[in-house]
Image (cartoon, rainbow, N blue to C red):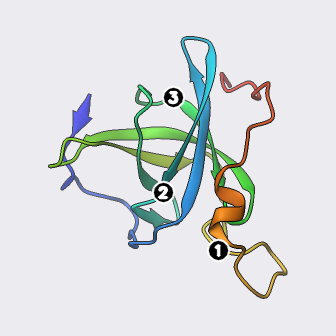
């Protein structure tokens, strides 16, 4: 089910654009997709996605600027006014600092282009739990 963009949100969202990669399985086959956040919050983020994910599906989200992975779930699917499908992703565990733009202990941001085309190390972890 696809909702509307003006639905209530439980955490403040900030318009931060970070390159991310989404990993998961569709019909038992692994997929990965490069995308960029539209907004982020302490609880997750909103990303455009072309893969046919479903609500409650578990995914692995990678912040491509820090190379940090985090398990999340599709909390909502939204069709934007432009017709794109946006996935509201909710973290399954607390992740302070996940949205930072540089690795912990680093003084500067990594170049986006250097991390954006990261390939996933298959097989994917079991997302059924």
Q: Quadrant of the N terminus?
A: top left
Disc 2/disc 1 C-alpha distance (Å): 13 Å
Q: Which mark is residue 57?
A: 3
Looking at the figure, which quarter contains the C terminus? top right
Task: Decide if residue 109 is on the left or right side of residue 82.
Answer: right
Quick one: label 1, few (<14), some, or many (20+) residues within 10 Å? many
Q: Is residue 53 above or below residue 44?
A: above
Which residue shows up at 57% across the image and 32% down it?
58
Is 114 or 37 nearer to us in this picture?
Answer: 114
Q: Secondary structure at mark 1?
A: loop
Q: CA distance from mark 1 to mark 3?
A: 26 Å
Q: What is the residue that sits farthest to the left in this orientation?
A: 81
Determine the CA span between mark 3 and mark 2.
19 Å
Packing grade of label 3 (10 A; few <14, some 14-19, many >=20) is: some
Q: Residue at x 60, y 68 (%)?
A: 99
Q: Residue at x 60, y 22 (%)?
A: 25
Q: Which mark is residue 101?
A: 1
Kindly indicate whether the residue at mark 2 contacts the one at mark 3 (C-beta within 8 angstroms).
Answer: no
The picture quadrant where one finds residue 26 is top right
Q: Position of residue 123 (x, y in %)?
A: 79, 24
Q: Residue shown at 64%/56% (left/top)?
A: 116
Closer mark to the observer between disc 1 and disc 3 = 1
Image position of 91 (left or right of 35): right
In the image, residue 88 lies at what x, y percent?
Answer: 40, 47
Q: Which residue is mark 2?
A: 36
- Considering every residue shown, the one lying at the far bottom of the view is 107
Q: Position of residue 32 (x, y in %)?
A: 60, 34
* Vertical position of residue 106 compared to residue 80: above or below: below
Q: Earlier in the sequence, mark 1 or mark 3?
A: 3
The extreme right residue here reads 105
């Amino acid at each position: 089910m696809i909702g509307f963009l003006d639905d209530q949100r439980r955490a403040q969202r900030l318009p931060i654009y970070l390159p991310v990669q989404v990993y998961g399985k569709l019909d038992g086959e692994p997929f990965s997709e490069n995308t960029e956040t539209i907004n982020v919050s302490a609880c997750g983020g909103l990303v455009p996605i072309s893969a046919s994910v479903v609500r409650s599906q578990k995914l692995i989200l990678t912040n491509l600027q820090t190379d940090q992975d985090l398990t999340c779930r599709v909390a909502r699917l939204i069709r934007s006014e432009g017709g794109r499908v946006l996935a509201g992703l909710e973290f399954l565990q607390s992740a302070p600092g996940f949205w930072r733009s540089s690795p912990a202990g680093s003084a500067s941001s990594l170049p986006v282009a250097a991390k954006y085309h990261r390939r996933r190390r298959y097989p994917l972890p079991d997302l059924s739990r």
